[in-house]
Amino acid sequence: MSLSVAALIATYRRPHELQRLLQSLLQVTGLSTVIVVDNEGSAEVQALVEKAYPGAQYLSPGANLGCGGGLKLAEQRALQMAEANLTHVLILDDDAVLAPDTITVLAETMERAQADLAYPLVTDARGHVGWLPGLIQRVPELRDAFDGTPEEFRARFGTEPRDFLWAQGVCLLVKRTALERHGPHRDDFWVRGEDLEFSLRFTAQARGILVPAVAVQHLPPPDNTALSREAEYLKHSAMVQNIAFIGFRLPHGRRIAWTILGALRRFFRLWSWPAVADAIAALWRGAVLGEPAGAGTGRTFRARFAALPPAP
């Protein structure tokens, strides 16, 4: 099949990871253009993009739009500049690393399966599978977290595609026609959950599949400082709020409303009971007020995050 794919990346203060991703994209078959939205607007990042992937489009929105807002801008630009032969867009985290055949395997599999979304196996720094999407039909062995390599996954569960309700935004191939039909990412989630809402919106009317035949790496930077722990806490709180908003306020999100229980369990397991007040605030803002984490006023999680001292 003839492929013309635009890779879309929203980044913020991750020059090392972004450079690594762009270098991997140089080897990827089927890629026609790369669009990078830099939420910091750094001259260093602009120079990096232009050097690491000649011909890439660099966009600086002039403000930190968040991941969803950055991807929305990239999606709008991709459709504005798209020629008739643009077939797909590829949503990427800036800390992903792709294999050369990622796009071709995903696209060919989704064409056979008549799907609009395709997501690969994703591996961590150990080479083990993680970040599985929300599969519709789970075999018993997949109810618990799978811990093994892609080869072990395929030997155990096969290589046939599996349908999902939602998928993370690490690496998601989307048909252009589906993006035009269902719309871009939301820009009011601030952080975490925009990929959940985006994929749920699509799978409410179309098919999304996990493609075990190909794997990509997800290599986020380490967060070891006390400051990054506070930042992580606020991002995790925002995730709870966004899940509550999706599950209780959006028609296409009601299928995952029950997952708020697991989200709260993980939240308290990590942050313990002193976090109760923020959990209640997240539920109130998300489920009752109908506010995702990028909306609202006062002491929102986003406002508290913005008040943190700059990272060293």
Image (cartoon, rainbow, N blue to C red):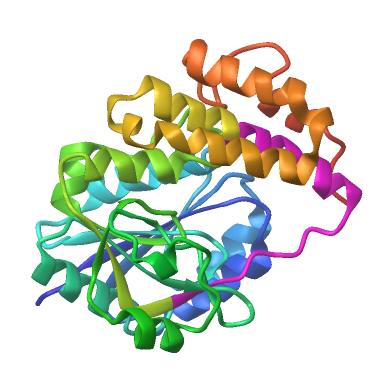
Quarter holding residue 224:
bottom right
> Is 57 positioned to the left or the right of 260 in the image?
left
Q: Position of residue 160 (x, y in %)?
A: 22, 76
> Is 37 positioned to the left or the right of 164 in the image?
right
Q: Position of residue 47 (x, y in %)?
A: 60, 64
Tell me, yes or no, if residue 191 can be seen here.
no
Q: Position of residue 65 (x, y in %)?
A: 54, 36
Quarter holding residue 234:
top right
Residue occupying image coordinates x 28% and y 38%: 201
Q: Position of residue 106 (x, y in %)?
A: 26, 72
Tell me, yes or no, if residue 86 can be seen here.
yes
Segment tinted magenta in the rendering: 216-239
Front-most of residues 70 and 298: 298
Front-most of residues 204 and 174: 204
Quarter holding residue 39:
top right
Residue occupying image coordinates x 32% and y 35%: 255
> Is 259 positioned to the left or the right of 304 in the image?
left
Residue 302 shown in magenta: no
> Is 88 positioned to the left or the right of 273 in the image?
left
Residue 234 shown in magenta: yes
Quarter of the rendering occupied by the N terminus = bottom left
| Placement of 116 over or under 257, stated as above or below | below
Total labels drawn: 0
